[in-house]
Image: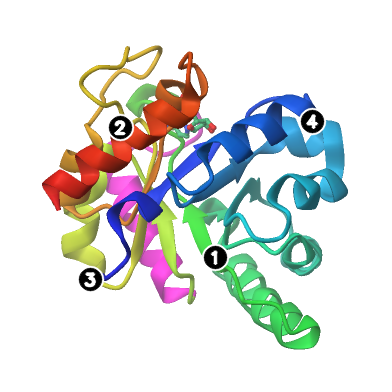
Amino acid sequence: MTLPPHERVFVPLDTPDLGRAKAVASDVAGHVGGVKVGKELFTALGPGAVLEITGGNIPLFLDLKFHDIPNMVAGAVGSAVNMKPYMLNVHAAGGRAMMRAAADAAGEAAAKTGLQKPLVLGVTVLTSLDDSDLRDTGIPDPALDQVKRLAALTQESGLDGVVCSGREIENLRAQCGPDFKLVVPGIRPRWASADDQKRVLTPADAVSRGADYLVIGRPITGAADPAEAAGRIRDELAEAA
Ligand code: C5P
């Protein structure tokens, strides 16, 4: 992939405060690939604020993890395209028909509005769930088996990639081939605290294992100078490339 290394990095704006979100987005723009908006900001501020934050030109990962009947998800994805996301996601556990509906809706909304079709990603198993949590939901297999099964289903359903943990990158890259996008959170430069992330990879390690996009939050958003922290990560990725 020819993407400049720092353009792989998406910074989460996990705040209900519009001023704070705009400040972080403008601090890091140019040092990273884009910003990630999740349920907290979106629910507090809505789609108009998302467009105000990105100005329609900072690449957006819309992390709303849709999971519903196919018709509802298709409608949500169609509406989401108006926020001009570079990528968005749905839960792979929603199944084949739901994922196909999401991919179709993204293509149709993009064609209708003339906007770019976003990459549509599947979320496999939330990394907050361990094998015992999965057993409670009726899935007896180890989490990695379920991740691989749902990644295969995501790919068969015509989606562009998955969100996965650092420890799944190599398995999924081997299974899904070079073009399937792997988006990886839980990334920590060596100089940053691990916070509540239990297993972390450095940005360069994640890329060398095969990640396409990295979600890096608190090492940047919690830094005294977010632009400087983002710049440091950009330089480290460039050195390793
Ligand atoms: O880098 P940091 O841990 O601060 O990033 C937090 C962001 O990454 C949140 O937006 C969260 O949604 C996302 N994330 C995560 N751990 C996962 C999956 C996603 O922290 N296992």
Q: Is residue 23 left or right of residue 34?
A: right
Is residue 52 shown above or below 88? Answer: above
Q: Measure how far apart labels 2 and 3 are at the Cα level.
A: 28 Å
Q: Secondary structure at mark 1?
A: strand
Is residue 218 shown above or below 148? Answer: above
**Tag shown at residue 120:** 1
Residue sitting nearer the eye, 102 or 81: 81
Query: Which residue is rendered at x = 72% and y = 30% of the image?
Result: 40
**Residue that mark 2 sits on:** 232
Front label number (3 vs 4) = 4
State the image coordinates of residue 132 (x, y, percent, origin top left): 37, 23
**Tag shown at residue 178:** 3
Q: Earlier in the sequence, mark 2 or mark 3?
A: 3
Q: Measure how far apart labels 3 and 4 are at the Cα level.
A: 37 Å
Residue type at mark 3: give it.
Answer: Pro
Front label number (1 vs 2) = 2
**Quadrant in the rendering for residue 194:** top left
Is residue 10 shown above or below 114? Answer: above
Query: Which residue is rendered at x = 60% and y = 74% of the image?
Result: 103
Region rendered in magenta: 136-157
Query: Which residue is rendered at x = 78% and y = 24% of the image?
Result: 17
Q: Earlier in the sequence, mark 4 or mark 2?
A: 4
